[in-house]
Image (cartoon, helix red, strand yellow):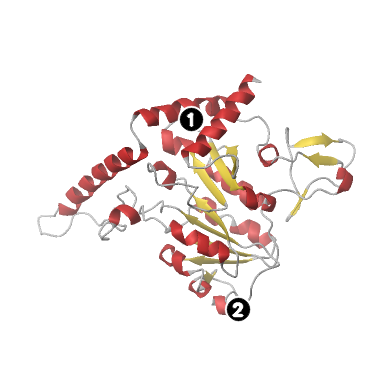
């Protein structure tokens, strides 16, 4: 009971850190952002009518989700992160995967077909893992409301490291993944998948009356493990999945020692100041480093460093994370 109480408290505190609560979101503890992404891919309600788009700047773990989409014969494509805010009105800015028999979204019917029979998933990083360029999160609401009714998967493994950069009360992403060691440094091997309640059915297994054939997902019979089922038979296919999404997706023994350490890590952050104070400090340090590096020259007068990102944007503090990629 004590451990369960600690886990429940940590779950609530993490949600509060990102501006929401268990009334609107469910938080599933994972081994990291990669496992959180894998859980979405394994359990998402794919179909042959689905479209899966991901940003070209996506982490490898996000790109790998296309393997699940392909197993369901879904259409896959990519888009430039700069085009995110335009996709709701012009999905033609996305491109089918190279090597396919079609060359444009128009040929696949993405622009003219309203995909009401399949769940469509769009994935992108909140902040580029390479350059630190940030996605326009204000585009998410429009993507969810457009004809394709995109379900949005936000990779916040990097964005969540920046103080105050992720507020889920104003960011309606359906699925958000994060890694706590990137935020706090400790504990390692612990992350989370945050799911909006209205998107939870897309990850839940189908339950046949009586549990005769066991839990089923879009890709066939669903794997289950210790703690995932409320009743099971070893000699038949009978299995009844537990109804709560946390119970279904938190398989086996959780990293309870790491989870128990989260409240103290959150308290350390609070002692450093408000999110706005920490954000301003981080931006000041990053900007000073950037300006000094930009001024470095070879003896010939050529720039010493080629720096990638949106550092020269008039509103650089909004579109660029505190990252310097050379």
Residue 135 image-quadrant placement = bottom left
Q: Is residue 212 above or below residue 319?
A: above
- Identify the residue at image location x=17%, y=48%: 292
Residue 27 image-quadrant placement = top right
Q: Earlier in the sequence, mark 1 or mark 2?
A: 2
| Image side of residue 246 versus residue 159, left or right | right
- Identify the residue at image location x=90%, y=37%: 235
Q: Secondary structure at mark 2?
A: loop
Residue 187 is marked as 1
Q: Does residue 321 appear in the picture of this structure?
A: yes
Between the residue at mark 1 and the residue at mark 2, the CA separation in whole angstroms equals: 47 Å
- Identify the residue at image location x=53%, y=64%: 143
Q: Nearer the viewer, residue 288 or 301?
A: 288
Q: Residues within 10 Å of mark 2 (few under 14, many from 20)?
A: some
What residue does disc 2 label? 112
| Image side of residue 115 versus residue 230, left or right | left
The furthest residue to the top: 2
Instruction: Count the labels in the image.
Output: 2
x then y, percent, for residue 277: 30, 38
Is the N terminus in the top left, top right, bottom left or bottom right quadrant? top right
Q: Secondary structure at mark 1?
A: loop
x then y, percent, for residue 100: 59, 72
Q: Does residue 255 appear in the picture of this structure?
A: no
Q: Residues within 10 Å of mark 1 (few under 14, many from 20)?
A: many
């Amino acid at each position: 009971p004590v451990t369960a109480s600690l886990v429940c408290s940590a779950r609530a505190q993490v949600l509060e850190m990102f501006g929401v609560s268990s009334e609107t979101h469910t938080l599933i503890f994972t081994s990291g952002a990669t496992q959180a992404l894998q859980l979405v891919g394994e359990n998402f309600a794919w179909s042959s009518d689905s479209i899966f788009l991901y940003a070209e700047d996506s982490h490898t773990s996000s790109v790998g989700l296309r393997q699940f989409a392909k197993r369901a014969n879904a259409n896959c494509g990519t888009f430039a992160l700069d085009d995110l805010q335009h996709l709701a009105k012009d999905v033609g800015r996305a491109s089918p995967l190279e090597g396919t028999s079609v060359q444009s979204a128009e040929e696949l019917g993405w622009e003219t077909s309203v995909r009401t029979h399949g769940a469509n998933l769009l994935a992108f990083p909140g902040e580029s893992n390479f350059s630190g360029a940030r996605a326009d999160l204000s585009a998410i609401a429009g993507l969810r409301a457009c004809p394709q009714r995109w379900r949005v998967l936000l990779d916040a493994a990097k964005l969540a490291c920046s103080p105050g950069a992720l507020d889920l009360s104003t960011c309606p992403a359906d699925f958000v993944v994060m890694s706590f060691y990137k935020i706090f440094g400790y504990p390692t091997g612990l992350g989370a998948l945050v799911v909006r309640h209205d998107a939870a059915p897309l990850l839940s297994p189908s339950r046949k009356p009586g549990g005769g054939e066991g839990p089923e997902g879009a890709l066939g019979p669903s794997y289950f493990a210790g703690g995932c089922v409320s009743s099971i038979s070893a000699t038949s296919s009978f299995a009844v999945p537990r109804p709560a999404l946390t119970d279904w997706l938190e398989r086996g023994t959780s990293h309870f020692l790491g989870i128990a350490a989260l409240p103290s890590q959150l308290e350390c952050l609070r002692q450093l100041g408000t999110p706005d104070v920490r954000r301003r400090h981080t931006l000041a340090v990053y900007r000073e480093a950037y300006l000094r590096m930009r001024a470095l020259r070879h003896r010939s007068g050529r720039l010493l460093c080629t720096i990638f990102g949106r550092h020269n944007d008039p509103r650089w503090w909004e579109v660029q994370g505190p990252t310097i990629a050379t």
